[in-house]
Image: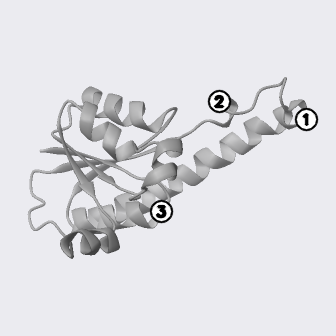
């Protein structure tokens, strides 16, 4: 079985890593840890903020280095739990890249954390987990924050 674990640098991704690592069966499961960097140049144009343009490449390189460290740390936790793990960092729209990476790698399952955004935040930021769940060509497991899960059970 192939599992694509999409992470960001948040407590929600940490919860997804913990949940996956706690799985009882690790034999025969390949996990690819993926982090997608939203590129700054998508938001910054030379016309809008010309004085920042020279710095964008350096900032992008630093973000890529940080992403590799983040992915490596997650991969190490999963290796320690007994999984066979590969690491990937990509750049672009996280929603599209997660779906594309899962299709190219032929993942059987995508695991993604949910920020649990509601209302205006969900409208403005969009929900990566919701979009992935709706459009992925394989099963998707959305790991919700524990506090959100407790609230929904209490209703």
Dot 2 or dot 1, earlier in sequence: 2
Q: How many marks?
A: 3
Q: Nearer the viewer, residue 28 or 154?
A: 154
For label 3, count other residues whose C-alpha is less than 10 Å away and answer few (under 14), some (14-19) or many (20+).
few
Residue displayed at 21% across by 72% down: 155
Colour pattern: one colour
Q: Quadrant of the N terminus?
A: top left
Q: Residue 73: horizontal and vertical position, in percent?
A: 43, 62
Residue 15, horizontal then vertical, whole percent:
33, 67
Identify residue for label 1.
51
What separation in Å lies between label 2 and label 1 (alpha carbons)? 16 Å
Question: Would you place residue 69 above or below residue 88 in this image?
Answer: below
Drawn side of residue 148 relative to residue 62, left or right? left
User: Residue 50 vs residue 25: left or right?
Assistant: right
Residue drawn at point x = 38 percent, y = 59 percent = 116
- Whichever of labels 3 and 2 marks the residue nearer the N terminus, that label is 3
- Residue 94 in view of the camera: yes
Label 3, label 2: how far apart the Cα atoms are: 22 Å
Tell me which corner region of the image, top left, top right, bottom left or bottom right, holds residue 43.
top right
Q: Secondary structure at mark 3?
A: loop
Upstream in sequence: badge 1 or badge 3: 3
Q: Nearer the viewer, residue 128 or 33?
A: 128
Q: Residue furthest top?
A: 47
User: Residue at image x 67%, y 40%?
Assistant: 60
Spot occupied by residue 54 in the image (x, y as percentages of width and height)? 85, 33
Q: Are marks 2 and 1 in contact (CB under 8 Å)?
A: no
Task: Describe the element under mark 2 as helix, strand or loop.
Answer: helix
Is 65 left or right of 25, judged from the image as shown?
right
Residue 87 visible in the snapshot: no
- Whole-Å distance between the Cαs marked 1 and 3? 30 Å
Please identify the quarter of the rendering in which residue 71 is found: bottom left
The residue singled out by tag 3 in the image is 10
């Amino acid at each position: 079985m192939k599992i694509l674990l999409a992470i960001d640098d948040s407590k929600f991704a940490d919860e997804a890593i913990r949940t996956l690592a706690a799985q009882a069966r690790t034999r025969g499961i390949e996990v690819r840890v993926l982090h997608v960097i939203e590129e700054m140049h998508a938001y910054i144009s030379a016309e809008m903020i010309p004085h920042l343009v020279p710095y964008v490449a350096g900032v992008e390189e630093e973000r890529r280095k940080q992403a590799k460290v983040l992915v490596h740390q997650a991969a190490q936790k999963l290796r320690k739990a007994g999984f066979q793990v590969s690491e990937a960092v990509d750049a672009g729209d996280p929603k599209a890249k997660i779906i594309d990476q899962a299709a190219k790698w032929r993942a059987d399952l995508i695991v993604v954390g949910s920020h649990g955004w509601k209302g205006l935040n969900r409208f403005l930021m969009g929900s990566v987990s919701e979009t992935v769940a709706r459009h992925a060509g394989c099963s998707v497991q959305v790991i919700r924050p524990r506090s959100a899960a407790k609230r929904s059970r209490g209703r």
